Image (cartoon, grey):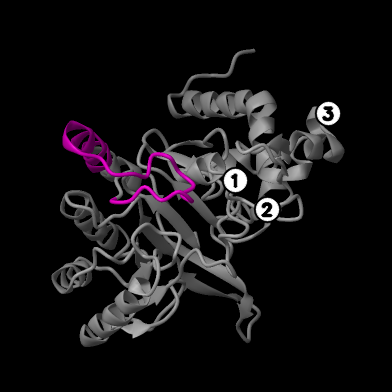
Amino acid sequence: MESIYYVLCWACHRRCKHCYEDRFRPYTGAALEAVVREAEENAPRIISHFPDTMLFRDAAAVGPDGTPAVRRGRIILAGGDVLVDPVRDRVLMPTLSRLRARYADSGGVRLVVQTTGDLVTGPIVEDLLRHGADHLSISGLDDFHTGMQGDRKDRLRADLMALFDRMGMVPGGAADGPPGQASYSFFGATPDQWIGKIWPRGRARDNSLSTATLADNFCNRWSGALGFLRHGQAGSEVAVDPTGAVYPCCLKTATPLGSLLEEPLTAILDSLAGHPAFEALSAGRPDRMGLTFGWSVEDFVQASKTTTPDGRPFANLCIGCDRFHERVLGPVIDSLREIRRRARHGVQPAA
């Protein structure tokens, strides 16, 4: 695949009001141990069900013989914040080593570590590079992340750039980079990027922060469901959470597609290929998911309307997607999952 967005653990050192996932928050004591142990125990089983290779074909880069270029895909290890102690030592570092070893003989993989930035230190960077990280993606340097207001984020960015430069890293994108050369990048929830149109999910939805409209189709873009079924080709990405649940988008549909604790990722995706609802998602047209179930595009649009907690009328296709899953698609996913389970165990379908 081109990309797997793997959320390793729910633990974070912040509880930002714009976060799309309620479970990303600080944990202490027994609660912290529970989420870390979940991540620690599930990671090997989840990784064992990742694709056999992370190579993909890029039809936009065709060689002289007309053959699409073959590129190395990436796995983004994210949270929460994966540098939170003890997630860093018990989950992140072993996972980096495990992934590096898994793909060593099948074309390799680009390993991206995504972190808010304020937990990064020189020894941690050294440890990340030693365990095989190719890229550090700093995601929290903006006024909307707790503790980053004002000029603190600018000072931290300058300090991190100096640190990365001393480590021999180079600025670049998470998607690609020079072989053997570690790189870094920064992004954040700035008004000109996505905070103004933030996903209607989690605490962002609870705090009525999204100003998205029906015109903002989060599905039809990167980190949405666009292309998720096209594994082995450019544009394919799925999201995986610490429980092994698989989603077609980082936003997370109301029902996961399956679980990597039980079965291979490609088997899940292949079982959905050709199904009109999932093909519509993969085409970036969630409003067409229900056409074969008696839901017109207008029905879907009507289901996409709601009211925010602060009393404003709100409409976005993500709301309609949630309702379609809850009312129609959930049982379909359960049925497909049972068919795959029976096939794995050699159980013949009922006559």
Q: Which residue is mark 3?
A: 294
Q: Are marks 2 and 1 in contact (CB under 8 Å)?
A: yes
Going by the numbered disc 1, the residue's amino acid type is: Pro
Question: Taking 314 as reference, is 139 left or right?
Answer: left
Kindly tell me whether residue 194 is visible in this rendering: yes
Q: Which residue is mark 1?
A: 200
Going by the numbered disc 2, the residue's amino acid type is: Ala
The image position of residue 250, as x and y in percent, is 51, 50
149 versus 281 height, above or below: below
The image position of residue 67, as x and y in percent, is 61, 76
Query: Image quadrant for the C terminus?
Result: top right
- Distance, label 3 to label 2, CA atoms, is 27 Å
Q: Are marks 3 and 1 in contact (CB under 8 Å)?
A: no
For the residue labelled by badge 1, is the local secondary structure a helix, a strand or a loop? loop
For the residue labelled by badge 2, is the local secondary structure a helix, a strand or a loop? loop
Work out which residue is located at the far left of the displayed protein and give it: 123
Going by the numbered disc 3, the residue's amino acid type is: Gly
66 versus 196 height, above or below: below
132 versus 296 height, above or below: below
**Magenta-drawn stretch contains 314:** no
Q: Give neighbour class at mark 3: few <14, some 14-19, many 20+ (Cα, 10 Å).
A: few
Q: Which residue is mark 2?
A: 212
For the residue labelled by badge 3, is the local secondary structure a helix, a strand or a loop? loop
Along the line of sight, the residue nearer the viewer: 217 or 26? 26
Q: Which image quadrant for residue 139?
A: bottom left
Q: How many marks?
A: 3
Q: Please provide the residue range marked out in magenta.
A: 13-40
First in sequence: mark 3 vs mark 1: 1
The image position of residue 314, as x and y in percent, is 71, 42
